[in-house]
Amino acid sequence: LSTMADDAALVVPTPAPATVTAASPEVFDALAGLTAPRVETVRRWRFGVGGAPQSDGATAGAPAGAAGGPTVLRQVQLGPLEATTLSGGDLDGVQKWLQDNGYQLRTEISAGREPYLSQGWSVVAMRLTSTEPLDGPLDPVTLSLPQTMLSDELIYPMRMSAQAKTPQIVVIYTLGEHRMQRVDPDAVTQIVDVDYAGSIAGRTDDATLAQVSGSGTYLTTTTTTIVDPAAITSDFRFVQAP
């Protein structure tokens, strides 16, 4: 997410209350390095008129509290970001809490939380609180769900993005025991590219990647291009590929 705005906030629905902590600042640089195409130089010989030998080089890339209001479970300050985990509450109650705490969301985006709240999901609300000018990227954060939330699939919430005004490009890195693939209904109507699939075992010393790869070191990078956000009907759902 890039912005020139003076203020910004992010509201993320999660299937269970999430714990928000700081991630290693270099985690996405590490991912970019791990998934970068490997460049190989291949020399090919061909013979022209008179049999004079010639060679050329080619490169190849290997796939490498009020009624209806939510309960504030925890609130942490991570540099210029304040992150609050909310649980419970209905749409009006959560919206009032957000407004009372400095969040401003378009009405249609706020309404996009209703399907999640009705299913008992929680919310993580993050906003900039720094009074100093910011220039450059913010450090990444980690949202961790309880270990009791065991599942055979991974879910990335996307339904609220149906209110986006411009095409969306979403890059998802998944780590597990095997390659992962999208299986949600929207996967067949969007442009989904697998950019990388392979093990990162022994290839990085990034602290955050070491932490989140405890259940598997097979990394899959999936880029999804959504030309018409209004057509979004489902979250991204990932399961093990055959």
Image (cartoon, grey):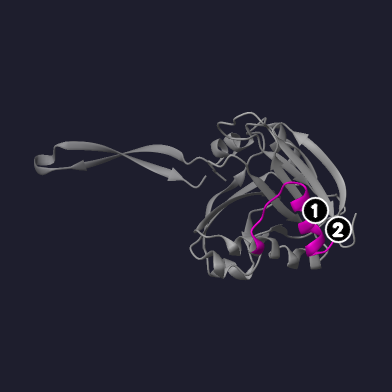
Is disc 2 surrounded by few (<14), some (14 to 19) or many (20+) residues within 10 Å? some
Q: Position of residue 141 (x, y in %)?
A: 70, 39
Q: Identify residue for label 1.
A: 97
**In the rendered structure, which segment of residues is drawn in magenta?**
88-107
In the drawing, does residue 61 fall left or right of residue 106?
left
Query: What residue is shown at x 52% (from left), y 60% (from top)?
Result: 165
Q: Are marks 1 and 2 in contact (CB under 8 Å)?
A: yes
* Foreground pick, 96 / 56: 96
Query: What residue is shown at x 64% (from left), y 64% (from top)?
Result: 108
Q: Amino acid at mark 1?
A: Trp
Is disc 1 surrounded by few (<14), some (14 to 19) or many (20+) residues within 10 Å? many
Q: CA distance from mark 1 to mark 2?
A: 7 Å
Q: Identify residue for label 2.
A: 69
Q: Is residue 90 magenta?
A: yes
Q: Position of residue 37 (x, y in %)?
A: 47, 41
Quarter of the view holding residue 46:
top left
